[in-house]
């Protein structure tokens, strides 16, 4: 028997009320969202929405894709949030990233009858997110799904293509999400963490005992990923540029400068892991055999992202964030002075990398990768805080700082020339 759209909507409402009753019985209702929890910049064009912290954009996931997080528990009651503004804010944020591959994590916990948008709004929103937004969305993780989500899926099924449907993954527990993503990079609301603990506690037989984590193995002498620049320098006869960087940059200089969207695409995660393993074992890597210019591009970003200390170092993070408070005419000088405070080895590697990115940007008429576009890709791979992840509000200053590095490379790196430096 066919179920009408109105019956499905009523069923969805019933399921949502059931969710709330079950949470109330468990003492698991989300706390009231606090205002101004995410965006302190009152000049933000969508400050009225951004301040709630509903949306976060963090670094790349394990596949080299930008990570966008939506948290329902941060949504205030409907009378306190203009849902049309929320839709505009979503599009405003996604517009900065949809030209690259990206991943969305949707934390469903916290959606209540008091704060949920109408189904009519959801339909309009889905239609608003046209092919431009769906094309480069590579994965959508729905965390802590309930029957409400499954009913909603049936309502929208006539609108959703089979190809888009394959991108959806239901994730019942945060432990499962960790199989796909580095959760240290994600801003997980405390309410979601508590909800996950209560869900696990209600599992048959109680929560599983915490897995024993074996002590970390010492890195191999040939290790490239996940070790410090100093370690690589000491184990590679004092080379200043890590081999994985020099090899990927050299290959991309020769083959990839005119590739449209270079650094915007992701690659198959197992292939990237296999190449990382080759590098860590000190075995040769021939990028020619893979026939995909985006693979060395992802490897380069992955190397930077897995450094224990970011290339720009932890102490520089706050100075990078403060760039928005500097008068525009003084920003190049400020960036120049800031990077001259980082250790000499970091400076040499940074100069090598930015010189290459400057070369890429000079081909932007063909490859579409301007300094601004490159900054959107590389900023979060060059600097991050020592604790937690990069917040959505920090992305703008990080991008501005990185864009200045790339666009004004000759000026920014003009004076400090350490002995023995190497340029690409």
Image (cartoon, helix red, strand yellow):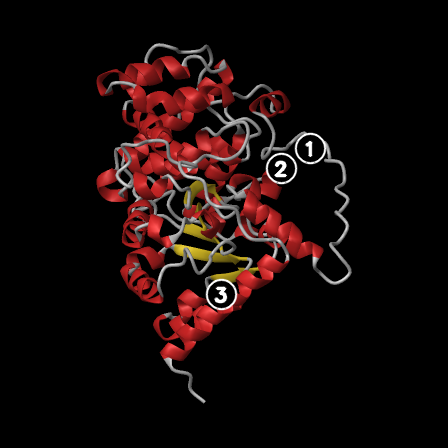
Q: Which residue is mark 2?
A: 280
Please tell me which of labels 2 and 1 falls first in the chain: 1
Q: Position of residue 149 (x, y in %)?
A: 48, 66
Q: Quadrant of residue 34?
A: top left
Please tell me which of labels 3 and 2 falls first in the chain: 3
* Residue at 26% over, 37% down: 363
* Residue at 53% over, 44% down: 188
The reply to whether dot 3 and dot 2 touch (C-beta < 8 Å) is no
The reply to whether dot 2 and dot 1 touch (C-beta < 8 Å) is yes
Classify the position of the C terminus by image quarter: top left
Q: Position of residue 277 (x, y in %)?
A: 62, 43
Please state which of residues 154 and 237 is positioned toward the viewer in this rendering. 154
Please state which of residues 51 and 300 is positioned toward the viewer in this rendering. 51
Classify the position of the N terminus by image quarter: bottom left
Please state which of residues 387 and 341 is positioned toward the viewer in this rendering. 387
Q: Which mark is residue 41?
A: none
Q: Residue furthest bottom?
A: 1
Q: Which residue is mark 1?
A: 220
Q: Which mark is residue 16?
A: 3
Q: Label 3 neighbourhood size at 10 Å, few (<14), some (14-19), many (20+)? A: many
Q: Position of residue 109 (x, y in %)?
A: 52, 55
The reply to whether dot 1 and dot 3 touch (C-beta < 8 Å) is no
Q: Quadrant of residue 215?
A: top right
Q: Quadrant of residue 225?
A: top right
Position of 26 relative to 381 (above/below): below
Looking at the rendered structure, the secondary structure element under dot 3 is helix
Distance CA(mark 2)–CA(mark 1): 7 Å
Please tell me which of labels 1 and 3 falls first in the chain: 3
Distance CA(mark 3)–CA(mark 2): 49 Å
Is residue 291 something one can see in this rendering?
no
Q: Is residue 266 left or right of residue 400?
A: right
């Amino acid at each position: 028997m066919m179920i009408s759209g109105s019956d499905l909507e009523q069923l969805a409402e019933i399921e949502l009320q059931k969710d709330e009753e079950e949470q109330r019985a468990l003492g698991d209702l989300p706390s009231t969202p606090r205002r101004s929890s995410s965006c302190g910049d009152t000049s933000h064009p969508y400050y009225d929405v951004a301040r709630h912290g509903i949306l976060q954009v963090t670094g790349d996931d394990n596949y080299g894709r930008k990570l966008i997080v939506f948290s329902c528990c941060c949504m205030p009651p409907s009378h306190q949030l203009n849902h049309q503004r929320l839709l505009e804010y979503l599009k405003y944020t996604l517009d900065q990233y949809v030209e690259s591959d990206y991943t969305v994590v949707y934390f469903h916990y916290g959606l209540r009858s008091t704060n949920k948008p109408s189904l009519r709004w959801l339909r309009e929103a889905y239609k608003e997110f046209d092919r431009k937004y769906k094309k480069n969305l590579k994965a959508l993780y729905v965390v802590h799904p309930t029957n409400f989500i499954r009913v909603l899926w049936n309502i929208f099924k006539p609108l959703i293509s089979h190809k888009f449907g394959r991108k959806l993954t239901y994730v019942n527990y945060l432990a499962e999400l960790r199989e796909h993503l580095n959760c240290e990079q994600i801003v997980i609301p405390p309410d979601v963490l508590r909800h996950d603990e209560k869900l696990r506690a209600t599992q048959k037989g109680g929560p599983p005992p915490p897995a024993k984590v074996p002590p970390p193995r010492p890195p191999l002498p040939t290790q490239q990923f996940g070790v410090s620049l100093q370690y690589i320098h000491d184990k590679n006869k004092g080379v200043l540029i890590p081999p994985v960087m020099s090899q990927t940059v050299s290959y991309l200089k020769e083959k990839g400068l005119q590739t449209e969207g270079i650094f915007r695409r992701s690659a198959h995660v197992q292939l990237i892991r296999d190449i990382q393993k080759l590098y860590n074992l000190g075995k040769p890597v021939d990028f020619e055999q893979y026939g995909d210019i985006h693979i060395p591009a992802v490897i380069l970003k992955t190397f930077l992202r897995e450094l224990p200390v970011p290339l720009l170092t932890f102490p520089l993070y706050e100075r990078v964030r403060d760039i928005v408070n500097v008068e525009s005419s003084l920003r190049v000088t400020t960036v120049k002075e800031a990077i001259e405070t980082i250790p000499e080895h970091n400076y040499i590697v940074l100069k090598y990398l930015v010189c290459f990115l400057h070369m890429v940007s000079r081909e932007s008429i063909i490859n579409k990768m301007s300094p601004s576009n490159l900054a959107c890709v590389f900023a979060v791979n060059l600097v991050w805080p020592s604790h937690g992840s990069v917040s959505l509000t920090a992305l703008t200053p990080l991008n501005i700082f990185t864009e200045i590095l790339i666009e004004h490379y000759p000026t920014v790196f003009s004076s400090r020339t350490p002995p023995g430096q190497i340029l690409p």
